[in-house]
Image: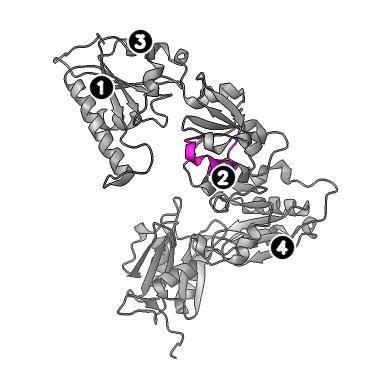
Amino acid sequence: MSGPGVRPDRPGRFWGVGVGPGDPELVTLKAARLIGAADVVAYHAGVGKQSNARRIAADLVPAGCVEECLTYPVTTGSTTHPGGYAGALADFYAESADRLAAHLEAGRDVVLLAEGDPLFYGSFMYMHDALAERFETVVVPGVPAFAAATASVAWPLVRQTDVLTVLPGTLPEPELARRLADTDGAVIMKLGRTFPAVRRALAAAGRLEHAMYVERASMGEERVLPVAEVDADTVPYFSLVVVNGDSVHGTGRRGRATDPASDPASAPGPAGPAPAELLVLGLGPGPDGWLTPEVERALGEVDHVVGYAPYVHRVPQRAGLTRHASGNGVEIDRARAALDLARSGERVAVVSGGDAGVFGMATAVLEAAEDPAYDGVRVRVLPGLSAVQAVAARAGAPIGGDFAVVSLSDRLKPWSVVERRLRALAEADLVVAIYNPASRSRSEQVVRAQKTLLEHRAPDTVVVVGRDVGRAEESVVVTTLAELDADSVDMKCLLIVGASSTRVDRAGRVWTPRWVRP
């Protein structure tokens, strides 16, 4: 950089320079040097407002340089733009990129000031997306606002193997509560109008008493308060919440997701209260509307939810609820941990997707409960809508007659048993619903199952392939056994292979008659 001017021999360089959270003394030496030598200094500003980034760097901007103030057309979701808020911002970023590109094409070096760090919730990222492929672009990191806020409250966010999660306050309240419950330390950005929902989410996650509010971190008007004491009407956008990771250490706290196989809190003491009932329940295949009222009531009454992480995450976080999420393949350990909690007097629910009794946790819990140590624990299974019912309903009525259900997973049984059962079901001319058809480590079994069934079924046997039924990515494909594309089948699919009587009507609905002719 050599000051203002035009160097047609080369395009200018584009610099994204972080200027820190507000205190000019937190600007890095590198940032200060680059700003002082810039041909063009650009910065963003709200409508009718001074640029905070420009204010921070005021003493560093060289006299005589070109300044480009990129003024947002809107700062909230309200706009008359035909494309709405997103359309207004998209046009703004495109126009801003064109303004900066004109300087760069003329050989001028451009420094775009960014509050905090350029790549941390910053508008610089959109300019980077638009310009980095055309011009040499360099990013200079800055002190992020949450680092300054953490210093202000003097709280260690995380220690050793703790997890720090940075969350936007614009997340839906239930999702924000879930993520707060499932992490150690947390930072919540983008407050302002979102603050009431953020405070409710903190309370639901059991984190409110360990959350501090920091307004305008590192600036002269900085304000630090416990979140519980903040007047929501006074919260500006330049504020955030710091959640202390130390609150999860020691005796633990409600709301934290843990691995029940290694959770010392789940081990009963030598003489605890009377055992509580252990509930095992199915959440259905996906949509909240498929959750039964009975299961919903049960989830609202228990103190602990135990299960495979994707299913535990479907349970809304609330105050007083501890979530124990673990990985796949540890069903018996998970069941024992839940039984231990119930034996110590805790109210516990073990969750499965679909119906807990159909390739779910019910059998694992009952298997673990055979241990005499759990004789005092009553286990009750609550039914849920199963995946086969959901796929069948989407297709029509393919399981309206006799049908069987089988899993292609050979994790708990040898493939020879799977193959023998498939052959017997094909010979019996039963509709067959196939769970767990494929996974990353089992890519050939659908082909082998298809070949086995074709030994006893006609090539034009109807097959329904349901994927992610009930979710946004849902698809239902009706094909035949011969034309089934095995490569398109994965773990998100459930297959229904029809009987010889299964048919497809003129409207494309699949159904199997209740009657069977001799």
Q: Earlier in the sequence, mark 4 or mark 2?
A: 2
Residue that mark 3 sits on:
33
* Crowd rating for badge 2 (residues with CA inside 10 Å; few <14, some 14–19, many 20+): many
What segment is highlighted magenta in the picture?
A: 183-202
**Local secondary structure at mark 2:** helix
For the residues labelled 1 and 3, say whether their Cβ atoms are less than 8 Å apart: no
Front one among 409 and 53: 53
Q: Which mark lies nearer to you, 2 or 1?
A: 2
Instruction: Tell me residue 348's x, y (percent).
Output: 69, 55
In the displayed orientation, state which residue is furthest to the right: 271
Residue that mark 4 sits on:
379
Determine which quarter of the picture holds residue 429: bottom left
Horizontally, residue 287 falls left or right of residue 365, namely left
Instruction: Tell me residue 44's x, y (percent).
Output: 33, 27
User: What residue sits 79% from the left and 60% below the top?
Assistant: 375
Instruction: Tell me residue 137's x, y (percent).
Output: 28, 23
- The label number, if any, that marks residue 177 in the structure image: 2
Determine which quarter of the picture holds residue 29: top left
Q: Earlier in the sequence, mark 4 or mark 3?
A: 3
